[in-house]
Amino acid sequence: MATPLSLRVFEAEARVYRRTWRGSVVSSFLNPILYMFAMGVGLGTIVDANLPGGIDGVSYLTFLAPGILVATALNTGASEGAWKVMGGIVWAKTWHARLATPIGIEGLLVGHLFWSTFRVFMVSVIFAGVIAAFRVAPLFESLLAVGPAVLVGSAMVAATTAFTVRLKEMSGLPMFFRFVVLPMFLFSGAFFPISQLPNWLQPVALATPVYHGVELARAIVVGTSPAVAWWVSVLYLVGWIIGFGVLCVKPLRRKLTP
């Protein structure tokens, strides 16, 4: 009965967040506005001046917005899977305390994934509102693009959690962000088409969840056809969530049970 019990974990996280939401909401609004102004308007003016036809027939701001939406979901999901997990296991040890209840390892893990995915959803909805405010796309299409972003964020929660639960100390997390998350952020099609990458690097970009999310979100916002069939990308992202979620169970049980 992991799923009903996992809702207790979700409820506990929501109670904590109710006291701390103000700071995160401010950054959730500010970050997309800064990205859109700096990269979309600032850099976009230069790009559009040198590419009269735009990128794939649209302005750089329009090309960039869905990519940054998904890339932001990537960062949010990775942070939830890293620092929250490390805090629960090592620093505050709240996950140890939760296992004194009937929740169990599976309920704890599913509740963590539910809550972290909800956090990604909240951040993505705010970003979608900013996209609509910049008149990149109507609000409806902007909100539809939240779907792929949430899938990417949830996939990164699962993958990062699977990595974090295997660490003995936090020193591995900065390296994970530097050599895994940052390259995904930069080279998965959010800022420029992956066709601009060297030939040997393009298959690596294709294998990242961010690429599939960016293609789906861009197809919704811009109206382009994704390079990969939409159902293939959705199944690929769901596979990441389930696969890495399963990989979390055994090391988490080793860490939290005597």
Image: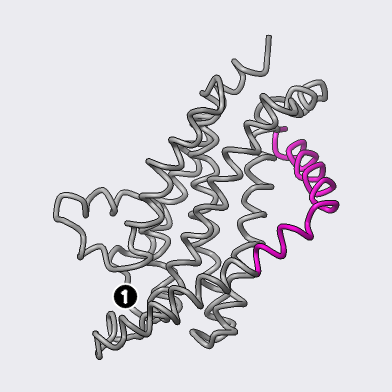
Res. 52 image quadrant: bottom left
Instruction: Please identify the residue farthest to the bottom as the structure is shown.
Output: 52
Residue 255: say if magenta: no
Q: State which quarter of the image contains the N terminus.
A: top right
Up the image or down, 186 lies above or below 91; here it is below
Q: Which secondary structure class fits the magenta region best? A: helix
Up the image or down, 147 lies above or below 84; here it is below
Residue 7: say if magenta: yes
User: What stretch of residues is rendered in magenta?
Assistant: 1-29
238 and 185: which is toward the camera: 185
Q: Position of residue 191 (x, y in %)?
A: 36, 67
Q: Position of residue 211 (x, y in %)?
A: 36, 58
Query: Mark 1, residues whose alpha carbon is within 10 Å: few (<14), some, or many (≥20)?
Result: few
At 62% across and 38% down in the image, what residue appears?
Answer: 83
Q: Where is mark 1, residue-wise?
A: 225
Q: Position of residue 99 (x, y in %)?
A: 76, 23
At 58% across and 74% down in the image, what residue appears?
Answer: 33
Q: Is residue 8 left or right of residue 238?
A: right
44 and 92: which is toward the camera: 44
At 75% across and 58% down in the image, what residue appears?
Answer: 23
Q: State which quarter of the image contains the C terminus.
A: top right
